[in-house]
Image (cartoon, rainbow, N blue to C red):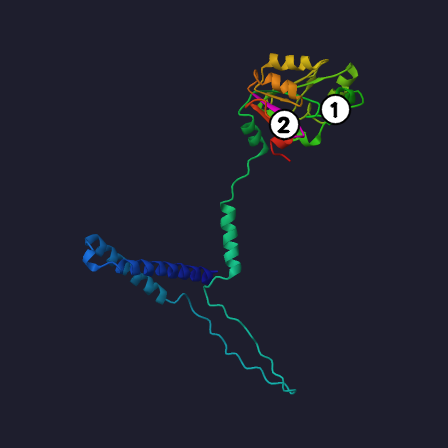
Amino acid sequence: MAESSKEELVQLIKRFGAFLTVKMSNLFSISFHNLNSRSVGAVAGLAVAIVFTWRLLRTPSGPQRRQPKRQAPAASSSGNSSHSNTTFMPSGVSTPSEDVRAQNVVDELFQPVKPTLGQIVRQKLSEARKVTCRLLGVILDESTPEELQKGATVRSSVLEVLLEITKYCDLYLMERVLDDESEKKVVLALEDAGIFTSGGLVKDKHIIYSLELMMYLQVLFCSTEIGRTSFVRQLEPDWHIDTNPEIVSQLSRFIKYELHISPTRTERPASNVFSSPSLEQFFGSV
């Protein structure tokens, strides 16, 4: 280990010496008539540094182990002789593999740190405190109220994003349903997905509040699309997330930001309206 450290020191000094040599050659290319007192002092300092480096290089780095002489291989009876082709690498010269390893270390040190999902959510929502979001086509796999009469399924890919939003914002989930049974199916699906229990949340009449995490989640139901629009207007959220382009367009005058979830790219009705194929893709979690 000591031998390796000394060799590294010698290599460093050699590189420094080469650097000084270049500097000296550049300096001496200037006419001595143009040198002032500071230039002369710089020349003297460089000369002293070169002498010091030269003396260090002359100092042996350590006791050298005597290398035994190689014996020429004896010729075989068949007349064929084997030759050993051994390539010797000068001491202190870095191999290509060492250069690659060194470059990999440098790349790892300067690799940008990837932000967490929580940081992305906060950045995307612009420090919002209240978010409203429809269920169909965003949180649920189903896309129509008629499908909810058969059952409700929470999208597994959206759960992580949804729970991150509830850490920073009051979240209101809302949807139009055709009957009370559909409402029960939705609440049961949300409960089975762990939305009500994650982080110590407690379900009570579709209102969920956690004193520990200071998060608030409420599930609202209505019988018409106008009712959902009315919910959003009354709550005055910082963000509203919806799949209905007409509702998004109507609310763009009243809501600070909106996210239109649509599988196809649509024209933005206003500058405060954003579009994405899914909620999780908007936050870059998939």
Q: Which residue is mark 2?
A: 266
User: Residue 248 in the image: x percent, y percent?
Assistant: 62, 20
Q: Quadrant of the C terminus?
A: top right
Q: In the displayed structure, would residue 154 be above or below residue 82? A: above
| Mark 2 element type | loop
Residue 183 painted magenta: no
Direction front: furthest residue: 267
- Is there a contact, CB below 8 Å, between mark 2 and mark 1? no
Q: Residues within 10 Å of mark 2 (few under 14, many from 20)?
A: few
**Residue type, mark 1 in image:** Ala
User: Residue 57 in the image: x percent, y percent?
Assistant: 36, 65
Magenta residues span 257-264
Q: Which residue is mark 1?
A: 189
Please tell me which residue lies in front, 10 or 165. 165
Name the chief secondary structure element in magenta. strand
The quarter of the displayed image where residue 226 is located: top right
